[in-house]
Amino acid sequence: MIEVRLAKENDIPRIIELYAELNIPNSIAESDKKPSLMDYKRTLNEINSVPGYELLVAEDNKDVVLGTMMLLVMPNLAHHASPWALVENLIVDSKQQRRDIGEKLVDYAIRQARNAGCYKIIINTDTERVGTRQFYRSLGFESSAHVYSIYL
């Protein structure tokens, strides 16, 4: 059985391992950084201090973290003051994919967004991740916008 829960400090090393599978492009701003475990713990504490911001993990019944994601519910003046939600850095261990772990994480995010009264939820993925895009479409997501980014 897979459980989705808030990440704890002792999950950080495993989360960082999972992020390595994302192949996130490095920006100039982060290229020289070599964060310590303390830096990551401080960042997790910052995340936990922001209402509506959650770092989540999916773990099995042996307490092994198999996936993670960030969920941010943001207040909004538009859309009749309805908030919206963003999912970032969703990753499932490549050896554990196709076991509904990603689906459980996304289901959790959708539930939280609905409970918060969000009018939409957004998940970003790299344009080259064809399988990931198919996965999100299978869950009802539609490609609805172009995202423009500048890595600083």
Image (tube, rainbow, N blue to C red):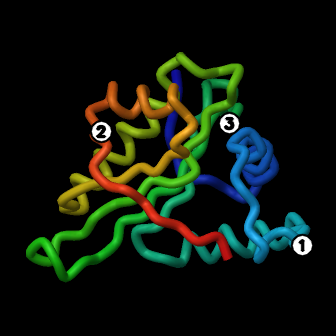
Circle 3 residue: 65
Q: CA distance from mark 2 to mark 1?
A: 36 Å
Residue that lies at the very extreme toward the top in this rendered image = 98
**Residue underneath mark 1:** 32
Residue 145 in the image: state x and y as whole percent: 31, 55
Q: Do the numbered discs 3 and 2 sit on residues whose CB atoms are within 8 Å?
A: no
Tell me, yes or no, whether the two marked residues, 1 and 3, touch with CB atoms within 8 Å.
Answer: no
Q: Amino acid at mark 1?
A: Asp
| Residue 138 against residue 53 in the figure, above or below | above
Q: Residues within 10 Å of mark 3 (few under 14, many from 20)?
A: many
**Left or right of residue 145, residue 12 in this image:** right
**Number of the front mark, 3 or 2:** 2
Going by the numbered disc 2, the residue's amino acid type is Phe
Q: Give the class, few, some or many, for how many residues have Cα within 10 Å of label 2's Cα (few <14, many ≥20).
A: some
Work out whether residue 125 or residue 109 is closer to the camera in this orientation and state it: 125
Residue at figure coordinates x 28%, y 64% from the top left? 84
Mark 1 / mark 3, whichever is N-terminal: 1
Which label lies toward us, 1 or 3?
Answer: 1
State which quadrant residue 138 falls in. Answer: top left
Rendering quarter of residue 17:
top right
Relative image position of residue 96 (x, y in whole percent): 65, 21
Packing grade of label 1 (10 A; few <14, some 14-19, many >=20) is few
Nearest the eye: 50 or 90: 90
Which structural element holds mark 3? strand
| Residue at the image point whose x is 54% and y is 77% from the top | 49
Residue 109, given in percent of the width and then of the height, sits at 38, 47
- What residue did someone put label 2 on? 141
Instruction: Give the amino acid at mark 3.
Output: Val
- Residue at image position (87%, 72%) is 33
Q: Earlier in the sequence, mark 3 or mark 2?
A: 3
